[in-house]
């Protein structure tokens, strides 16, 4: 009887023990699940971070690659950059010095005067040759300001660039000079400058010279002998040529361009996929988007800094002041579009980041949105009343004019932009007059009518 009385207690204890075992098993299982979840979360964060790094690095490298491809390998873009340099004073000064030296080499005025002057007049050879130098440089400066020079400049650069691109792409083994060089052929430009000088002083060349009519399509190895025959002089093989790609570097450039052409598209695709995957796998996409924008902005800052530093190092390596100014103008034609695009991208990234932050669940952002909403409703309520417009009509009108003046001072507007701005200011002024002015004057008119009108007789 006593043992039977203790059986329920024993059963209760067994039940409690069983419940404890189940509890411990469930706790262990929960711990394992939480551990796995934490591990997956860590792996996910690491994967997102790696994808961001790959995407940001890919963006930085591919952006430079596309810029180089567009500005160096595209002849039309190249001409948009190089063509206007014909009118740049710094380039004209450097090119004028180079052309003058080449022409003086052909004329050789000191030797000419030593031949024609008597023995007692040999002392005049040096000052007379200096006068000829000044005359030649003056005529060349006039030639550089002519339309013919601009046509020759554009044609020479376009011909040389198309040939260089064909060679670099492996589409042609023909270059504009002997050996593995690609050059800008300026012999026709020298020929045109000589014609300009000969028309002003026919005897300056020592005799009547029938100069050949050379074009940029004439290869230097064909044009130079014709010029030698006309002038009766011996010229060096590289006369009148500016080397673009030198011996020993052409093959390396061909290989580099071939690799860039094959890998640039693939790198761009990897960049887009990596950035999209980082957002897809992230469990905190707003934070990931902000990190992505910060990384892309850092990549753009690196591109800008490298470009500016490269330009500075290029200019520091040029000892001649005239050539340095020309190199500055040329490099600026290629660097400025890159800086402009990166500046726009930085502004866009900053605006997107600001929107993401302000629209986020952060307490200060929530308060800011609430206050902005309340302010907007208050302003809307005030402006919906014509009384407010009548009270502030003059301030709004003159404020619009002030904003227009500020825009004119800051922005470089075209004719259509100026017309649109003028119409906008005039339209706003008239609209305010119609909306606020008419009703503002009615009470005064009504008051005058009430005061001035005669009352009823009697």
Image (cartoon, rainbow, N blue to C red):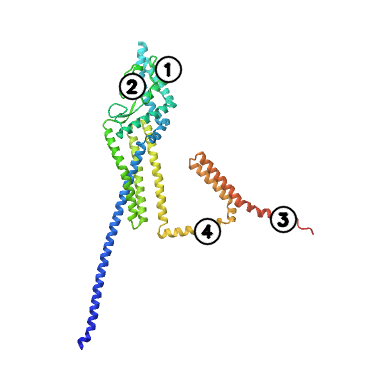
Of callouts 4 and 2, the N-terminal one: 2
Q: Are marks 4 and 2 in contact (CB under 8 Å)?
A: no
Of callouts 4 and 1, the N-terminal one: 1
| Residue at image location 27% in from the left, 60% down from the top | 39
Note whether 427 is above or below 332 in the view shown.
Answer: below
Of callouts 1 and 2, the N-terminal one: 1
- Relative image position of residue 215 (x, y in whole percent): 38, 24
Note whether 217 is above or below 279 in the view shown.
Answer: above
- Relative image position of residue 306 (x, y in whole percent): 33, 41
- Relative image position of residue 377 (x, y in whole percent): 51, 58
Q: Are marks 1 and 3 in contact (CB under 8 Å)?
A: no
Q: Compute the Cα span from label 2 to label 3.
A: 100 Å
Q: Quadrant of the N terminus?
A: bottom left
The secondary element bearing badge 3 is classed as helix
Residue at mark 3:
451
| Residue at image location 68% in from the left, 55% down from the top | 446
Q: Dot 3: few (<14), some (14–19), or many (≥20) neighbours within 10 Å? A: few
> Disc number at residue 224?
2
Of callouts 4 and 3, the N-terminal one: 4
Q: Compute the Cα span from label 1 to label 3.
A: 93 Å
Q: Quadrant of residue 193?
A: top left
Note whether 375 is above or below 10 in the view shown.
Answer: above
- Relative image position of residue 248 (x, y in whole percent): 26, 32
């Amino acid at each position: 009887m006593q043992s039977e009385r203790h059986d329920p207690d024993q059963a209760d204890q067994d039940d409690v023990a069983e419940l404890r075992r189940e509890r411990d098993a469930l706790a262990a299982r929960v711990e394992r699940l939480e551990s796995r979840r934490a591990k997956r979360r860590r792996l996910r964060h690491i994967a997102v971070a790696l994808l961001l790094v790959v995407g940001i690095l890919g963006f930085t490298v591919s952006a430079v690659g596309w810029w180089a491809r567009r500005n160096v390998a595209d002849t039309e873009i190249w001409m948009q950059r190089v063509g206007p340099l014909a009118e740049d004073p710094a380039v004209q000064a450097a090119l004028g010095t180079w052309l003058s030296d080449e022409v003086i080499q052909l004329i050789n005025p000191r030797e000419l005067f030593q031949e024609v002057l008597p023995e007692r007049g040999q002392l005049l050879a040096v000052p007379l040759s200096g006068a000829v130098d000044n005359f030649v440089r003056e005529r060349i400066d006039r030639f550089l300001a002519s339309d013919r020079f601009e046509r020759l400049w554009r044609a020479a650069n376009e011909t040389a660039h198309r040939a260089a691109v064909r060679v670099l792409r492996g589409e042609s083994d023909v270059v504009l000079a002997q050996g593995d060089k690609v050059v800008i052929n300026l012999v026709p430009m020298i020929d045109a400058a000589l014609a300009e000088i000969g028309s002003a002083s026919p005897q300056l060349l020592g005799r009547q010279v029938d100069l050949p009519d050379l074009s940029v399509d004439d290869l230097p190895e064909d044009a130079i002998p014709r010029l030698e025959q006309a002038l009766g002089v011996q010229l060096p093989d590289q006369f009148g040529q500016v080397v673009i790609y030198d011996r020993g570097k052409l093959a390396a450039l061909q290989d580099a361009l071939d690799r860039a052409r094959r890998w640039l598209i693939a790198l761009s695709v990897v960049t887009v996929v990596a950035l999209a995957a980082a957002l897809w796998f992230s469990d905190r996409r707003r934070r990931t988007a902000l990190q992505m924008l910060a990384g892309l902005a850092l990549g753009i800052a690196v591109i800008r800094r490298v470009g500016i530093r490269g330009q500075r190092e290029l200019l520091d390596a040029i000892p001649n002041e005239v050539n340095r100014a020309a190199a500055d103008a040329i490099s600026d034609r290629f660097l400025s579009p890159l800086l402009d695009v990166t500046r726009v991208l930085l502004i866009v990234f900053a605006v997107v980041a600001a929107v993401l932050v302000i629209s986020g669940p952060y307490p200060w952002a929530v308060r800011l949105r609430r206050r902005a909403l309340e302010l907007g409703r208050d302003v809307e309520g005030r402006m919906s009343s014509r009384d407010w417009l009548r009270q502030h009509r003059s301030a709004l009108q003159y404020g619009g004019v002030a904003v227009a003046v500020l825009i004119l001072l800051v922005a470089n507007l075209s004719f259509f932009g100026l017309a649109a701005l003028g119409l906008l200011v005039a339209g706003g002024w008239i609209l305010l007059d119609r909306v606020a002015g008419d009703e503002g004057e009615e009470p005064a008119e009504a008051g005058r009518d009430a005061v001035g009108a005669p009352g009823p007789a009697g």
